[in-house]
Each structure stands twice: as C-alpha cells, then as structure tokens.
Image (cartoon, rainbow, N blue to C red):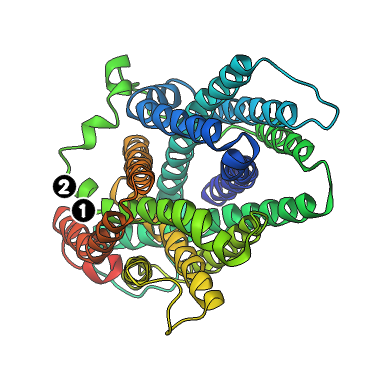
C-alpha cells in the first residue's frame, strides 16, 4: 500500500539523518570537550564562549530562517558544513600550538583562526539542531497520518486515536534518535581517549574529528530528500526569522523548559567543577575526562533506549528530575567526606548526569515533538536549544566566579519543577485536543 511505502521511506530518511547527525555531533562535542586542553585555558574558554554566544543568537533568528528557506535535508547539510569548518580550524590551531618540530604561527593569527572557527561552530550547532528538530517533527507528522494503530482497543473519539499515535511515534523516534547520538558519541570519545593515551603526538589526532564530520556531511548529502516537505504556503521572511520568538507567548514552551534548564546547569556543573576540579584532584590527569565522558554517554544511551519502550513519558520525566536533584544535593556536600569514598563520589555525578541526559535527549524531545507538531517544531526545537545553552552559559559563568553554590541551588530548583511543568503541559494539551487523552499522554 501507498501508506506502507511512505512509512518505510520516512523511517529510512529518519535513520539516515540520525546516523549522520550523530557522527557529526560526536566529533563536535569531542572537540568542545578538549578545547581548553588543546588550545590552552584562556583561548579555549574564549572560543567556547564565542561558540555559545553565536549559537544563542543564531537560534533566535538565523537558524529558523535557513531551515525554513531550504529543504530539511539542505538545512542540515549547511549545519554539518559549518560544524566541519569549526573542527578543522580547531585541529589546525591545536596542532600548530604544540607541534614537536617547532612550527609556529603568530599568536594573533592563532586566536583569530580559533575564534573564527568557533563562530562557524555556533552557526553549525544552531542550524543543525534546529534542522533536526524540524526533520523530526515532519517525520512524526507523516507517520502519524499514515501509520495504523496497533495494540489499542478503544472506540473513542478520533482525536484520542490520533493523540495516541502521536505519543507512540514521538516516543519511538526520540528514543531511537537519542540512542544513535549516545552510541556515536560514546564510541568516538572512548576511542579518542584511548588513542590520546597510546599515541605520543596526540594533538594530530584532532584532524580525525573534521574528517569524521566531513564524512557524515557527504554521506547525508548523498541520501534522498525527505518526502514530507514544508507546507506549500511558505512563511514570509519575517515569519521565518521570528519562528523562535513567536512561540514565547505559549505557556507550554515554558512549562517544558525546566528539563532544558536543569540539563544545561548540570552540564556546566559537571564540566567546570567535576571535570575541572574533583576529577583532577582524585586522579591528577586530564586523560580520564574522556573515559568519564564516554561512561556518561553510555548510561544516557541505556536510559534513552528504555524510554522508547512505551508511550508514557511521566515516569521518565520523574526519573530525570530525581537525577538532576540528587546532583544538586551531592554538590552541597563536602568533598571528600566520610559517607562516600572518592571513587564513589566521582562516579555518582557521572552516572546521575548520564541518566538526566538520557531523559533530556529522548523523553524531553518527544514531549516537545508531541506538543509542537509539524512546522511548529522549527521554533520549538530552536527554543529548546536556546534555553539549554543559556542555562549552561550561566552555569559556567557562575562557576568561573566561584559561585558554585548558586549553580547547585538553581539546579535543584529547576529539577524540582520538571515533573509539575510536564504534567501541566499535558493537561493543557488534553484540554486543547479533547477528552480521553490524559492517560495516553502521561
């Protein structure tokens, strides 16, 4: 049947996107993780600051405009290319700074190249993440319209059936997408950490990152276009640019924002305080950061896979809330202490952050896709990226100012509001759709 063919093509296109996107993002996050080590603390932090700032500004206007002006595939290719430019600039500067035969570049040019690369990195992240959100929403919309409903025995309203299908599809695709990201990131970071330990000229290994990103870009560019395109009635240039801001009056956007804020603050806490202080104090070598990050990603992948086993999202949102809350509580305890040994203390942060990240990457994405289907996903996922990035930037700034206590208090506050916000958004969606949907959504 035609619907079965459309179903197959949509899922195949989604798998192609998820695989290539995961490889590109795995390479990019590895470069960001090593930035302050490879480029030096000052230049590395400055480059990351530029990347975050451009990411936020582009997500508010440029990224939605690019993705709505081009096809879903073309927008992602542009984002992948920008990410590849960032990693190439990063690899060049890292290799020149520490070349064993004494190659040198004028310090000003090193800084310019690193910051220009970071500029393209911010563009790439905003365009690619907004593009994959639009891609995700369009696939969900198409599958919801074509798939038959299995394992359901209810003769209620048609809206109830459609809501159940939407919930099922968003849970399955978000879990699958998150698993792809976690597997790729875990594999790349673990292998990269091993090679850094075994190979003496470890900084030359950074050239593997842009090669991997360019391979992902070329592979995705060679795939077929997504059949589900944007609506024939195109948005005006102004509407494209304000697609992110136009959703701000919607209370559901803010009710679902607490997971994004908690994840951003938790990532800042782990990267700045746990990686920068506790891990080095415990093991006295930065090479363990790669292994610890790979472990966090592996745990997030398992959590993401679990979240795709059903349509109910409430239990997983509660699990993520508890994980982020415990990180904040443990952050208030002295280190080391008489209750937890050094190894257990360090391990707890990475395990809990992995659980929280798994919920953020899968269940949280499914909630956004379900609440903002179709073309609305363009602005919704751009807002998701803005909220997460701003929370992470705020966390890093507070940590740099030695105000880690404020980070933990903000993290605990955001974590405690995740489940209430999600339940209120689900109730609002039930009222908008009709009766009989509450149990399916939550």
Residue 116, quarter of the rendered image: top right
**Callout 1 environment at 10 Å: few (<14), some (14 to 19), or many (20+)?**
some
Residue under numbered circle 2: 251
| Residue 363 point in image, percent of width and height | 40, 60
Q: Residue 203 in the image: x percent, y percent?
A: 75, 38
Q: Residues within 10 Å of mark 2 (few under 14, many from 20)?
A: some
Tags 2 and 1 in contact by the CB under 8 Å rule?
yes
Task: Out of 234 and 305, give the one closest to the viewer.
Answer: 305
Residue 10: where, in percent of width, then height?
55, 45
User: Distance from label 2 to label 1 (Cα)?
Assistant: 6 Å
Looking at the image, residue 279 sits to the left or right of residue 420; the answer is right
Report the residue marked by disc 1.
255
Q: Is residue 122 visible?
A: yes
Q: Residue at x 55, y 69 (%)?
A: 302
Q: Secondary structure at mark 1?
A: helix
- The picture quadrant where one finds residue 16 is top right
In this rendering, is residue 294 above or below 121?
A: below
Horizontally, is 99 left or right of 358 in the view? right
413 up-or-down from 92: above or below: below
Residue 337, quarter of picture: bottom left
Residue 20, compared with residue 308, is above or below; it is above
Front-most of 411 and 404? Answer: 404
Q: Nearer the viewer, residue 345 or 159?
A: 345
How many discs appear? 2
> Which quadrant of the rendered structure holds the C terminus?
bottom left
- Element under disc 2: helix
Tell me what residue is drawn at x 35 percent, y 53 percent: 265
Q: In this view of the protein, can residue 321 be seen by the observer?
A: no
């Amino acid at each position: 049947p035609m619907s079965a063919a459309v179903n197959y093509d949509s899922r195949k296109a989604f798998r192609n996107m998820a695989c290539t996107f995961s490889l590109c993002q795995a390479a990019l996050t590895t470069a960001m993780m090593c930035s302050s080590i490879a480029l030096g603390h000052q230049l590395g932090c400055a480059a990351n600051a530029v990347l975050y700032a451009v990411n936020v500004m582009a997500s508010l206007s440029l990224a939605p405009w690019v993705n709505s002006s081009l096809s879903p595939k073309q927008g992602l290719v542009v984002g992948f290319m920008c990410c590849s430019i960032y990693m190439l600039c990063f690899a060049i500067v890292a290799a020149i700074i520490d070349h064993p035969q004494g190659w040198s570049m004028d310090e000003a040019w090193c800084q310019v190249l690193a910051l220009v690369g970071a500029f393209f990195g911010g563009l790439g992240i905003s365009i690619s993440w907004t593009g994959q959100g639009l891609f995700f929403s369009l696939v969900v919309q198409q599958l919801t319209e074509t798939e038959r409903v299995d394992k359901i025995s209810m003769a209620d309203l048609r809206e109830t059936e459609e809501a159940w299908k939407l919930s099922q599809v968003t849970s399955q695709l978000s879990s699958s997408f998150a698993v792809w990201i976690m597997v790729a990131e875990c594999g790349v970071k673990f292998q990269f950490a091993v090679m850094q330990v075994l190979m003496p000229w470890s900084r030359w290994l950074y050239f593997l990152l842009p090669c991997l990103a360019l391979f992902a870009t070329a592979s995705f560019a060679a795939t077929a276009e997504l059949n589900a395109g944007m609506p024939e009635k195109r948005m005006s240039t102004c509407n494209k640019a304000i697609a992110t801001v136009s959703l701000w009056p919607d209370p559901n956007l803010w009710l679902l924002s607490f997971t994004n804020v908690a994840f951003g603050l938790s990532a800042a806490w782990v990267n700045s305080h746990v990686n920068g202080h506790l891990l080095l104090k415990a093991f006295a070598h930065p090479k363990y950061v790669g292994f610890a990050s790979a472990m966090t990603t592996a745990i997030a992948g398992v959590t993401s896979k679990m979240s795709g086993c059903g349509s109910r999202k409430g239990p997983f949102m509660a699990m993520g809330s508890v994980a982020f809350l415990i990180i904040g509580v443990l952050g208030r305890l002295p280190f080391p202490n008489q209750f937890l040994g050094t190894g257990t203390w360090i391990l707890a942060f990475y395990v809990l952050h992995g659980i929280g990240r798994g919920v953020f990457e899968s269940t949280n994405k499914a909630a956004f896709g379900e609440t903002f289907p179709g073309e609305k996903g363009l602005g919704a996922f751009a807002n998701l990226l803005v909220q997460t990035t701003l929370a992470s930037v705020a966390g890093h700034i507070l940590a740099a100012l030695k105000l880690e206590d404020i980070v933990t208090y903000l993290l605990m506050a955001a974590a405690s509001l995740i489940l209430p916000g999600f339940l209120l958004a689900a109730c609002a969606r039930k009222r908008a759709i009709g009766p009989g949907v509450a149990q399916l959504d939550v």
